[in-house]
């Protein structure tokens, strides 16, 4: 049985699952669907064509599903989809998609969005990501799984960040970051592999293969695309192949490391 505070406003048509908790002064729009065992704290707003899965925790003053911050938006039918077991902290802003970007913003499962995080229109977020306070994702940004974004970090539109990557706090990211890598700075550059994250999820043999590939790709001064193609063809490591495939298909380019820039 759901628990709904008497000051909450739930418009006709909204669908709430079992054991949903709705706090004081929450507003839930008519097209919203909320899954079982989700809690919504005071003063949160959930609007638009928004579907929220099971077991989510939505904290106070979140604004979820409000119209995209895109001047081209003209009232089209767009959508926000949120998976299961996410934690969405205070003052987060999550916008739906736009017609030009596929009409859907999609958030996976078991993500932590800390206070004041903004996910712009048409963002795709994988599973088990952590976005620290004030991280800001512009439209069309795509994150893989197990990505960590440091606090106060803006990410340019159309940037793609691969699995297990980490972006340091107070960075400004304008290019793609390959999986397993660490980047930081303004503008952000690659600084190596995200070894702390990799050690939590991979064995030593996989990490060593990635270390060797990283050296060849980013530290030996060779043409990046050529090395990526060769390693993709020669390596027996699926992780290395995944890294090389990301580089080969990047549309915004990979930021040079500081070492590469010094080499000219």
Image (tube, grey):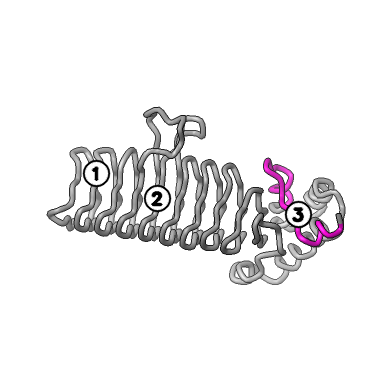
The percent position of residue 208, horizontal first and vertical second, equals 75, 68
Q: Position of residue 57 (x, y in %)?
A: 33, 60
* Front-lying residue, 14 or 37: 14
Is 45 covered by the magenta stretch? no
Image quadrant where one finds the N terminus:
bottom left
* x 61%, y 47%: residue: 160
**Residue 216 locus on image (x, y percent):** 83, 58
> Which of the two labelled residues, at mark 1 and mark 2, occupies the earlier sequence position?
1
In terms of secondary structure, where does tag 2 sit? strand
The answer to whether residue 217 is left or right of residue 61 is right
Disc 3 target residue: 256
Question: What is the secondary structure assignment of the residue under circle 3?
Answer: loop
Q: Which residue is mark 1?
A: 15
Cα distance between the residues tagged 1 and 3: 48 Å
In the image, what residue occupies the spot 35% across and 44% down?
51
Can residue 139 be seen in this snapshot? yes
Instruction: Left or right? Give the position of 150 relative to 114.
Output: right
* Of labels 1 and 3, the one closer to you: 3
Residue bounds of the magenta highlight: 244-263
- Asked whether the viewer can see residue 19, the reply is no
Q: Is residue 208 above or below residue 22?
A: below
Residue bearing the label numbered 2: 93
Q: Main secondary structure of the magenta part?
A: helix
Residue 246 painted magenta = yes
Q: Are marks 1 and 3 in contact (CB under 8 Å)?
A: no
Report the Cα–Cα distance between label 2 and label 3.
32 Å
Q: Position of residue 16 (x, y in %)?
A: 24, 48
- Please identify the quarter of the rendering in which residue 4 is found: bottom left
Taking the image as shown, residue 73 lies to the left or right of residue 257, namely left
């Amino acid at each position: 049985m759901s628990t709904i505070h008497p000051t909450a406003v739930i418009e006709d048509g909204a669908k709430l699952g079992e054991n949903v908790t709705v706090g004081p002064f929450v507003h839930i729009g008519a097209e919203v669907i909320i899954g079982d065992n989700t809690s919504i704290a005071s003063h949160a707003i959930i609007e638009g064509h928004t579907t929220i899965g099971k077991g989510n925790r939505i904290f106070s003053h979140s604004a979820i599903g409000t119209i995209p911050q895109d001047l081209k938006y003209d009232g089209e039918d767009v959508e926000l989809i949120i998976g299961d077991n996410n934690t969405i902290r205070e003052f987060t802003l999550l916008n739906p998609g736009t017609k030009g970007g596929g009409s859907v913003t999609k958030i996976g499962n078991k993500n932590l969005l800390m206070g004041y995080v903004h996910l712009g229109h048409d963002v795709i977020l994988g599973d088990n990501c952590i976005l620290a306070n004030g991280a800001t994702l512009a439209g069309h940004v795509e994150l893989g799984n197990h990505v960590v974004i440091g606090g106060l970090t803006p990410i340019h539109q159309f940037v793609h960040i691969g699995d297990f990557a980490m972006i340091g706090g107070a960075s400004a990211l304008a290019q793609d970051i390959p999986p397993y890598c660490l980047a930081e700075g303004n503008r952000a550059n690659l600084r190596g592999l995200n070894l702390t994250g990799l050690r939590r999820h991979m064995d030593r043999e996989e990490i060593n293969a990635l270390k060797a590939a990283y050296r060849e790709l980013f530290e030996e001064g060779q043409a990046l695309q050529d090395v990526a193609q060769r390693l993709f063809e020669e390596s027996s490591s699926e992780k290395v192949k995944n890294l090389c495939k990301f580089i080969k298909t990047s549309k915004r380019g990979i930021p040079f490391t500081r070492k590469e820039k010094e080499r000219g």
